[in-house]
Image: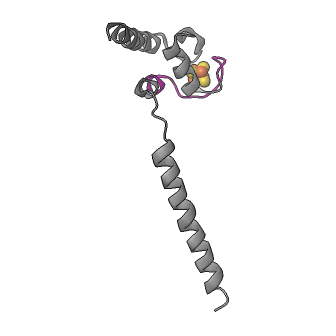
Amino acid sequence: MNIIIPALVLAGLGFILGFLIFIVEKYFNVEENPNIEIVFDMLPKYNCGACGFPGCKEMAIGLLAGDNNTTQCKPLKKEDADLIQQKLDAIFSSKEQS
Ligand code: SF4
């Protein structure tokens, strides 16, 4: 009997906090540029930091901002770098047209 009340309190707190997380996620969600995920998927995803960024996601954001280039990623193969560059060129040219 002594365990029921704390278990109910914990369950209630879990429900309330879960509901708060749902509300915050729904109303404060920031839409991310979908191209970040596309470029990120093309990187090796080692998160080694050899490019000077803390991880591949930040490298993808930098590539899309035009602040860096694919040669900074040391583990990236030349063929994959060329594919990423083609994708970046397509993204940049579609932005110029719109
Ligand atoms: S060097 Fe390449 S694999 Fe390593 S963190 Fe940077 S983008 Fe990712």
Region of the chain picked out in magenta, as a range:
39-53
Q: What residue occupies the far front of the structure in this picture?
A: 27
Residue 5: x, y in percent? 63, 84
Quarter of the C terminus within the rendering: top left
Residue 95: x, y in percent? 37, 12
Query: What residue sits 53% from the left and 60% below the top?
Result: 18
Q: In front: 98, or 91?
A: 98
Query: What residue sits 53% from the left and 54% below the top?
Result: 21
Ligand 1 found in image quarter: top right
Q: In front: 15, or 79?
A: 15
Query: What residue sits 57% from the left and 73% below the top?
Result: 11
Quarter of the N terminus within the rendering: bottom right
Query: What residue sits 52% from the left and 10% below the top?
Result: 66
Q: Count how many numbered circles sit on residues in the image.
A: 0
Residue 47 is a magenta residue: yes
Residue 1 is a magenta residue: no
Protein image colouring: one colour
Residue 55: x, y in percent? 61, 27
Above or below, 8 against 75 in this view is below
Dominant secondary structure (helix, strand or loop) of the stretch shown in magenta: loop
Q: Quadrant of residue 92?
A: top left
Above or below, 47 against 89 in this view is below
